[in-house]
Amino acid sequence: MESELFVGLDVHKKTVVATAVDREGNRVDQSSFGSRDSELISYLDGLPGRKHVVLEACNVWEHYYDAALSTEAEVTLAHPYRVRLISEASLKSDKVDSETLAELLRLRGIPVAYAPNPEIRALRQLVRDRWFYKREEASIKSHIYAMLLRKGVQYDDRLLGQKRKREELRSHQIPEVDRGLDVLNRFDELTKDLDEAIHQEFLESKDAQLLKTIPGIGEYTAVALVAELCPIDRFPNVEKLCSYAGLVPTNHQSGESSYQGHLKTDANRMVKWLLVEASWSHRQWAGKESDVTKVARRVARRSGKQSGNVAGAHKLLKIVYAVLKRGTPYTPDRPSFERTAAES
């Protein structure tokens, strides 16, 4: 019978600690080496038999994952938050962590995280870069508006979103405003290629075009949701998707007591932000008869405006799930997905 090894990798920016154990849990090897892919490949190639490799999802996991795959090893990506819940111990070091990962993999106790393929990763990086610049741009605009208010300058709402009109602000000769306008112009140049690439991805993505049929969702939001959520079948139900987006509260229960706390923090913050923003736009475009509008207003009257915004985003995510799951455009009077599935 071919020998089988389970290899746990504790990866960092500059170092990797690897521990290999056999089927019986005996430690076969424990080594430390640098962060170059060639070092990891050389290490795995030097181990005998069939190899199963596990590493945690972190900000540097991608190139380690690809390097391990190139050795024909079976590679598993572990959910870092859930691994901590399982293996938290008073004695913690890189060697202990790598051996714990190997043991959990051997015992089939690894909480698996989704590992997107290189094409999806590239699309995610594209939309996340644009999201970064969007947030920076919003910060600069807020700074300029604050300077205008401080100097007593009256301005129209959303003035900075209109490139020609915002240049008229230079006539006030406020240095802080002029510097902010220079930065905004620089951002326009930097993000032009990103916007063109996202537009091209939209034209090539059927799922993104379906999502754009939902009022309030534009090209960027549609492509970003496709990058972060698809393939949608990886979510067994809409509740799992809402949990992934952080649009459900935490729950604390003990005996007969049950308490719902703040929204989940171990979630995809970008998806959450996109849905909250899109729900606002949806309510403006779809009007009072939209289910998103009705839910948001009902919850806002009972629990406040912020809770209403979250409830609207939660409802919009259910619509997104139904559109992607069915593969058909949005229509406001369509029956729920569950009903259609039952009828079929």
Image (cartoon, grey):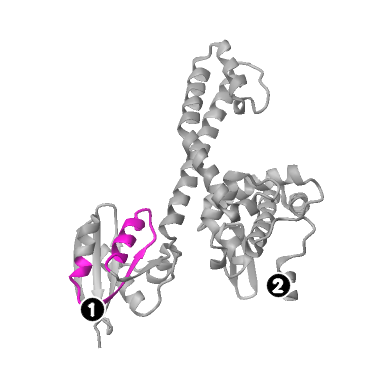
User: Does the segment drawn in magenta span residue 120?
Assistant: no
Report helix, strand or loop for mark 2.
helix
What kind of element bears circle 1? loop
In depth, the one of 325 and 43 nearer the eye is 325
State the image coordinates of residue 173 (x, y, percent, origin top left): 54, 11
Left or right of 343 on screen, residue 25: left
**In the rendered picture of this protein, how many numbered marks are placed on residues?**
2
**Are dots 1 and 2 in contact, CB under 8 Å?**
no
Quadrant position of the C terminus in the picture: bottom right
Question: Residue flagged by tag 2: what amino acid is it?
Answer: Ala
Residue 338 can be seen in this image: yes
Q: Which residues are magenta?
A: 43-71
> Which residue matches tag 2?
341
Q: Name the residue rendered at 43%, 69% in the picture.
A: 112
Residue 92 in view here: no
Q: Which residue is mark 1?
A: 49
Residue 103 at x, y percent in the picture: 32, 76
Q: Reply above or below: 47 against 24.
A: above
Q: Is residue 14 above or below residue 92?
A: above
Q: Nearer the viewer, residue 225 or 10?
A: 225
**Crowdedness of circle 1 by 10 Å Cα count: few (<14), some, many (20+)?**
few
> Farthest right residue?
289
Say which mark, if any, is on residue 301.
Answer: none
For the point 55% across and 34% down, the residue is 138
* Front residue of this view, candidates 294 and 199: 199
